[in-house]
Image: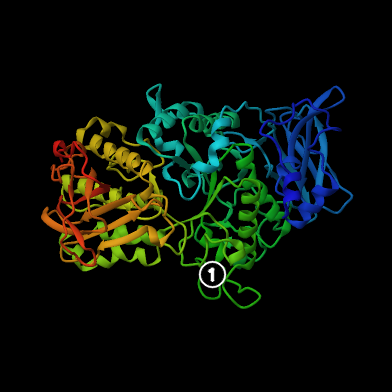
Amino acid sequence: MNEQTLASQRSTSVERHPSASCTRDRSALTDQDLHLFREGTHARLYQVLGSHPCAEGEVLGARFAVWAPNARAVSVIGDFNDWQSGASPLSPRADSSGIWEGFVPRAVHGSRYKYRIESREEGFVADRGDPFARAWEVPPQNASRVWSLHYMWQDSAWMRERAGRDALDRPMSIYEVHLGSWRRAVENGSRRFLTYREAAPALADYCAELGFTHVELLPVMEHPFYGSWGYQTTGYFAPTARYGTPEDFMYLVDTLHQRGIGVILDWVPSHFPNDVHGLNYFDGTHLYEHADAREGFHPDWNSYIFNYGRNEVRAFLLSSALFWLDRYHADGLRVDAVASMLYRDYGRKEGEWIPNRYGGRENLEAMAFLRGLNEAVHREYPDALCIAEESTAWPKVSRPINDGGLGFDLKWNMGWMNDTLRYMSLDPIDRKYHQGQLTFSLWYAFSENFLLPLSHDEVVYGKGSLIRRMPGDAWRKRANLRLLLGYMYGHPGKKLLFMGGEFGQWNEWSHESSLDWHLLDLPEHQGLNAWVRDLNRLYCVSPALFQRDFDAGGFQWMEFQDAENSIIAFVRRGEDPEDLMLVVCNFTPMPREDYRIGAPRAGWWQEVLNSDAWMYGGSGKGNFGGLESTPIAVRDQYNSLPLTLPPLGVIFLRYHGDKPPDAEEKTP
């Protein structure tokens, strides 16, 4: 897609007045729209398909347009015509596009509706929701709603400055949230969901206090089954009505932006559910999905796979992605289950999948779609992020398209996550036999632009919460969790932490209840919370910890061979040669006195953070604010530091050069 085409599709975040004339309405389909739709490059289909409130003369209503090429009749049924079939028929366009359209009186903002589709297939009649609906009924009700988005954004300062905030050489600490279970309100003796507007100030205040730079929301797109957490999407252009209106969701995003917090939306173009009001077998044919179940049905999730080889389907998905960046000011998309898109045999046994035209297992059409998606997003919104949840060793996921890559900005580092959690779950006495699980990630850490995820997937399905996965008694579990989080913040790559992990939620996450906020009344959980706060604060003001995340020159091992004592140490470097941070981890409960670690520069090293400090619930072992290197060689370094390493602890030491005048007054 060229720049001129994308520019022609740009739109503002405030739509036309709902009583605009249908004849002058920009939602009317043009020949250019149809050309781009057939070509699969239309990135703004939401402007011309779906329902659009307008007026014909003095009559208020809405213009409808739906793609149903195999239909022999389509009508709009809703509360404006008593749901009577045929009362509001649509007409097929004469251009063989398969689009049906028409004006329906009294279908105004807020009206409920569906499309009644009579297929050319004998006996097939179905009532479908609108694939482009801006709003839906509150589940389990499943009608679409006519909606015109009107919201006065107050985040202009954020939008102007966003490019600098979302750059890959800037800090990125993401708080992953499921809105329905983050926090709930007590009403009439029971707990209910917070609305978008209720959640907005509470979430913004909490994230600002803890220093997170971004919030990532599990899918908010409308989904019929709450227990899917949003990953079984039916409304690709509508935030779920469970928590309020579309404008209420805009208020949530706006509030976060005004507090300096970015918003990343989880987006699911990999599969969709089989609900009768959804996309599957939409017009009596497999319109959005493949006809052959070996290509079109996902056995793992009991859902349908989009047909990425069909141009109109690609345009639908492309338009959905850009819709959230356009209308809702999202700062990025986390694309779910990319691996399931890339491999034709994903989750399938021999004989249950069809090879590509070259006989391979790669899904060439999905590859082309993902490249087109990233190309379009970056041309239209160069300051927005596309993040891949890709769990295999597929090469160049986050490399430029012109270099053979898929074009994503970031890729989740699932290897780091799996190895690290497996290691941390071991009894410390056994960790010395598995040192490689800690160090292996640095062999490939710079092959992609990695994000380190401790996500919702790691605290469900019997895995237990992060703190429960740590070994030992309660004190050691907390110490191990602080160590795990400190190690993550020191390791190259952007950061993501699922809600509850920041204060040591004991119970495994359940979407049916709120987090256990009462734990923050206890000093030990306050200490964990303070540790995450101080990690974020140090991280965001320390260029050594983020500027060169994807540059091997920004990392140097100081110690990785001492498996016997389960100790690792490394230096992170910023662009300024004087900007150095030494990170030392002791993965045993045995404190180490006078343990020498090599130092790349002679001078004073200030201990700026210590997970074993009293305030975090530790034992208070430390280095009294810092120490000066001595000219004693260790490994390949001419200077070294005789450190006190706290039990199950991590320390951060910033290179200071000259000894600060108040160094003697520092306490651990």
Q: Eyeballing the image, is 569 above or below 109?
A: below
What residue is shown at x 30% (from left), y 39% (from top)?
534
How does the figure colour the protein chain or chains?
rainbow
Residue found at the far bottom of this picture: 359
Q: Nearer the viewer, residue 116 or 437?
A: 437
Looking at this view, is 611 or 54 the one in front? Answer: 611
Q: Position of residue 354 (x, y in %)?
A: 61, 72
In this rendering, position of residue 348 left or right of residue 469: right
The residue that appears at 30% across and 51% down in the rendered structure is 581
Q: How many marks?
A: 1
Q: Is residue 78 visible?
A: yes
Q: Quadrant of the N terminus?
A: bottom right
* Crowd band around label 1 with a 10 angstrom C-alpha radius: few (<14), some (14–19), many (20+): many
Q: Is the residue 197 above or below the residue 322 in the image? A: above
The amino acid type found where label 1 is placed reads Asp
Q: Residue furthest front?
A: 658
Name the residue carrying label 1. Answer: 345
Residue that appears at 68% across and 42% down: 132
Task: Please provide percent x and percent y for residue 166.
Answer: 50, 44
**Residue at 18% of width from left, 50% of height from top?**
628
Inspect this view and state whether residue 237 appears. Answer: no
Label 1 secondary element: loop
The residue positioned farthest toward the right in the image shown: 94
Q: Answer above or below: position of 237 versus 566.
A: above
Q: Indicate the quadrant containing the C terminus: top left, top right, bottom left or bottom right.
A: top left
Of residues 240 and 249, the one nearer the viewer is 249
Locate residue 529, reporting x and y percent. Answer: 28, 37
Q: Quadrant of residue 112?
A: top right
Left or right, 27 with reference to 395: right
Q: Position of residue 514 (x, y in %)?
A: 37, 35
